[in-house]
Amino acid sequence: MDFDVLNALLRPRSVAVIGASNTPGKIGYLAAKNLIESDYAGHVYPINPKGDEVLGVRAYPSVLDVPGEIDAAMVVVPAKFVPQVVEACGKKGVRGLIVVASGFSEIGLRDLEEEVVQIAHTYNMGLLGPNIVGVMSNSHHCNASFAPFMPLPGRAAMISQSGALLIAMTVASYTRHVGFDKMISVGNMADVNFADLVSWLDQDDNIACITLYVEGFQNGRRFIEVARRASKPIVALKAGVSAHGAAAAASHTGSMAGSGKVYDAALQQAGVVRASGLNNLFDRTLALSLQPPMLGDNLMVISNGGGVGVLATDAAEYYGIPLRFAPPDLQAELQASVPDFGSVKNPADLTGMGGWPEYLETVRHALRHPWVHGVVVLFCETQRNDPMDIARAIKRAVDESGVTDKPVIVSFIGGEKVETAMQWLVENGLPTYGAPDVAVDAIAALREYARNCMSAMETIVPYQDVDETVARAIIAEARAKKSGALTEFEAKQVFAAYGLPVARTELARTEDEAVALAAQIGYPVVLKILSPDILHKSDAGGVKVNLQDETEVRDAYRAILANAAAYKADAYIEGVLVQEMAPLGTEVILGSVNDSTFGPTMMFGLGGIFVEILKDVTFRVAPISSDQAMKMLVDIKGAPLLAGARGESPRDRVALAEVVSRYSQMIMALGDEIAESDANPVLVYVEGKGVKIVDARIILSA
Ligand code: ACO
């Protein structure tokens, strides 16, 4: 989206309110009032068929009657009039449309919505909405919305897909002491979307953190790209994870993908910090908009009570930044401010004797020490101390330390005096919370952000020893047979074209051929029925394993054909696969779906009951490097089984990660052809012995 258009929408120099009204309570009245009775410095042009004036300002019957230029037009007329209004805006040369009106795709009127967007595009206009509250910008004193209050000023920007929630958040920002420079309602996102807004907000100097309330993306891949490039933290609350597609999915992977895990993966790959709920969204926004990222894992906790220190310690472990003992030289420095019955290890416990001078000294020492990457300061209100004295001491320590690249987060627990001190701390740039675990969660968000920045820098170098032409030829042949899925034999050939280690598999059309192929492959072998009409081969008695010699192969061949005939008399039999009998290994499953939002997406998990019952799987949007695949392997709960649990040798995770990476390259390259796929089971051997794909399945896109 053109930045000129976004400038017009988010920083308009003039706004027309089409549907401005003098009738109190009407949305057109509220919208006009917000702009007219405020410090907004731009021109406001009320548009109303009666002309005259609205709220004392001259009104015009149409935008075409307005003498000056119009950057943005708020459209507050019933949906059926919107096309003609948008047409007039186009003729007038308006750049941005803020379509507040409801009654479009959200009630099934997709055609009307598309018509309006089409008209907007004819005139190079951008359209925010429809079905939105509007846009608010504190730095421009511009409330181009019908929300009665602007949010508490601050350095965050909120983009919300829910209008009601956005209005509630404007007022909640005051009680939560979380400041926003901008609040943007995106509604149906018929045109301007999250990615457009994130890229614009990223270059806005008034913004330090971008906060999202997301129900769904339209073009998930573009969002990932924009978010990965963003230079500011993005924190998102994702709601409304649906089980779309899960019921209809034809593969194992497909049935797992509807669980919201694809969104989890995509947001992680986009480098987005996640929020677990609305409170958490506010808490994390506060930290991310006021404090720098935490560049290492060494968190120092300073408290005046053992209890809160232990709570913070537990929380630190829970949120993935477990506390470590402070190094001896730091402990020695802290000793001067801590009584003998306190502790200098970590948490540093100043005990109930700790007053403002002790807080000042310990916080300053901790911040200046190179070992420390971030500090959480805890304070329990006691008779001995005025909370405001402690607050001032913490702020002074931060200022005097001269350190600006380490986050400091505070938690105060107590009554009214504590409330006042907490607010003062936030106003002075120090995020402060009412509980130690919430403070630790906030600093964990800053750690998560720093880690995300590191992984956003990773690049993916594609494997060159792949043969897309061969893979596409096999798929074309299957399509020519009007087949919606590849046979196991074909799927394995496609996998092999991408350098994936499939167990050697050959097709026999006669018993003698089976015997000859078995001799070539080497005993023991497996025989499997190959028929497009028999999907569940084992159920049909179509699989015989561990065949040791010619006699066993001949017996198995005959038995398989007889079983197939009994199972489905009219089944078309292509032949019998003769396959190398892979030695036992740890079973894993790989798979893919072509997600409607994010496109080709990889799944990895442990096989058997782990996938079927425990659903212990993880996803990544393709393609991924083998380093990223390595991280996928530790994402699942069963990861210790691959690392070598209970005295077993570690499995060949390096080889497995390469296989996952190659697989992701395959589904990306063939994204137009492959709807879903599975490699199941995949056997992983001890380190150095590699991986073997025993069975493969590819379902073609419609
Ligand atoms: N040009 C200029 N003005 C016009 C035009 C036009 N073509 N057509 C009508 N108007 C005027 C009307 O004369 C009226 O002014 P008046 O009060 O002086 O007579 C004004 O525009 C509004 O028109 P109404 O027909 O009175 O429409 P009403 O105000 O009842 O509803 C609205 C319009 C608000 C756009 C409504 O259709 C709507 O969509 N409501 C929902 C909006 C909403 O909630 N959006 C956010 C969703 S998110 C959330 O849930 C918070």
Image: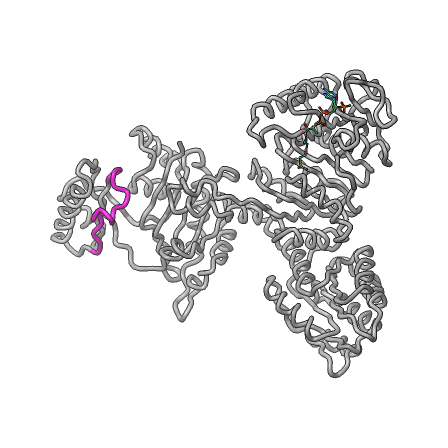
Q: From the image, which quarter does the C terminus lie in? A: top left
Picture coordinates of residue 410, whole percent (x, y): 74, 63
Q: Residue at x 30, y 59 (%)?
A: 584
Q: Is 637 located above or below residue 120 in the figure?
A: below
Q: Is residue 215 left or right of residue 146?
A: left
Q: Which SS does the magenta portion mostly show?
A: loop
Q: Is residue 521 left or right of residue 637?
A: left
**Is 506 within the magenta?**
no
Examine the image and state in which quarter residue 572 appears. top left
Q: Is residue 307 left or right of residue 262?
A: right
Q: Residue at x 80, y 18 (%)?
A: 50
Q: Is 22 located above or below residue 406 in the figure?
A: above
Q: Residue at x 69, y 55 (%)?
A: 283
Q: From the image, which quarter does the N terminus lie in? A: top right
- Residue placed most toward the observer, 485 or 452: 485
Residue stretch rendered in magenta on the structure: 531-546
Q: Is 32 located above or below residue 173 in the figure?
A: above
Examine the image and state in which quarter residue 73 appears. top right
Q: How many marks?
A: 0
Picture coordinates of residue 22, whole percent (x, y): 81, 27
- Residue placed most toward the observer, 148 or 395: 148
Picture coordinates of residue 656, whole percent (x, y): 42, 54
